[in-house]
Amino acid sequence: MHRSAAPSRRGFLLATAGAGAALGLAAAGPAAAGTRPRPHPRPFGRYGSPAARRTPRTLYVDPHGRGDFTSVQAAVDAAEGDGWTLVLAPGTYRETVSVDADRTGATWIGASGDPRDTVIVYDNAAGTPKPDGSGTLGTSGSATTTVRADGFTARGITFANDWLRADRPDWTGTQAVAIKVMGDRSAFHDCRFLGHQDTLYADTRDLGLFARQYYARCYVEGDVDFVFGRASAVYEDCHFRTLVRSDLDAAPYGFVFAPSTAGANPRGYLVVRGRVSSEAPDGYYKLARPWVPSSDTTARPMLTVRETHLGAGIDAVAPYANMRDAHPWQDQRFREYRNTGPGAATTVPENRPQLTRAEAAAHTREAYLGDWRPYERRR
């Protein structure tokens, strides 16, 4: 029988998060259910309003009707071309949202500054039937939010998928993506990504595009491969949290990272000064496994984790595993450098490939992101 942990997490998402504590407090465990707060008298905070528009290309979204639109997708549809800003008032936006490739340079701002206040959430899974009856949605089709455009920036927003295995214990398509990001120069500051399997899909539009992505001070939770894809992505000062699974009786419960970096791409996933914590028993999670998809059997997944605290939930003896025996993790580009915590203990050296100090100099945000510096720019 398949049961899912964290029904309270769905209760939290169904009810708008009110004024919350700082982002880091999300690590305390599953978010508790709450009551819908009364609308704030200044829903857009310091970012203006429809009557005092910040710029001509700023649109305001509020589920209570005090903005230009009540849904995020309606605002995206209206924001044709480059350089639009969407200011999202606190609330729960239960919808799927898609940003086409021609809507470049978009910025989304959670007006309160606390990502727990502004939640974009839906509950599709890979096994969800398509409306036209032609099959199921698949992993990519399950995404609550899909971003194809280059130059996308989000600040202070929660992206979530609250589909639960317990709802459909007979389904095999249990992937449920919170957000799929495919564009180059995609940045997320102080955001949360909530889900279970395949939460954060950091990808590219095609094999030939080495899309750069940057995640700063973000919180990501899940169980199976919950940070995955082929982007060149830097995760700086981010917190990754693994969840309890009551449908399994033994380890491993899942894997934090599942990169699918193209073989020709010299830059995969880079985790810097992060933290990996767990609700699960000690040693029940692997740090990563390589994803070599059938659509690109030449992929050479790449993950570097450096100066990061790995909690006891990570299996220190064997932190990596194979997704397919034909593509062993030892043949991929997995490296660590100066990690700390019980999950970083080197008990079997051949299972913990380390960078030298000289090699580590090539694994920095500057090296991965090149002439794009999202860590220096705020708007």
Image (cartoon, rainbow, N blue to C red):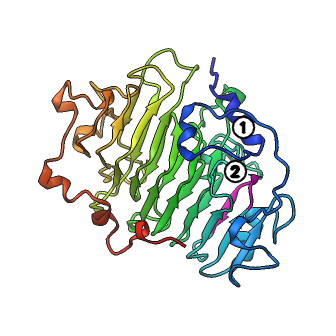
Percent position of residue 347, x then y: 20, 24
Quadrant of residue 196 within the rendered picture: top right
Q: Nearer the viewer, residue 173 or 275?
A: 275
Q: Is residue 282 visible to the viewer in this orientation of the structure?
A: yes
Query: Quadrant where the C terminus lies?
Result: bottom right
Q: Main secondary structure of the magenta part?
A: strand
Which residue is at the far bottom? 56
Q: Nearer the viewer, residue 53 or 260?
A: 53
Q: Is residue 91 magenta?
A: yes
Question: Mark 1 is on which residue type?
Answer: Phe
Percent position of residue 228, x then y: 45, 47
Q: Secondary structure at mark 1?
A: helix
Query: Marks 2 and 1: in contact by CB < 8 Å?
Result: no
Question: Mark 2 is on which residue type?
Answer: Asp
- Which labelled disc corresponds to residue 245? none
Query: Quadrant where the N terminus lies?
Result: top right
- Taking the spot 46% from the left edge, 43% from the top edge, the residue there is 239
Whether 353 is drawn above or below 153: the answer is above
Mark 1, Cα crowd under 10 Å, few <14 / some 14-19 / many 20+, is many
Q: Which residue is tagged 2?
A: 117
Percent position of residue 54, x then y: 69, 79
What is the CA distance from the residue labelled 1 to the residue labelled 2? Answer: 11 Å
Q: Secondary structure at mark 2?
A: loop
Magenta extent = 89-99
- Which labelled disc corresponds to residue 12? 1
Q: Nearer the viewer, residue 286 or 45?
A: 45
> Looking at the image, is mark 1 or mark 2 nearer the viewer?
2
Percent position of residue 94, x then y: 76, 50
Q: Nearer the viewer, residue 283 or 324?
A: 283
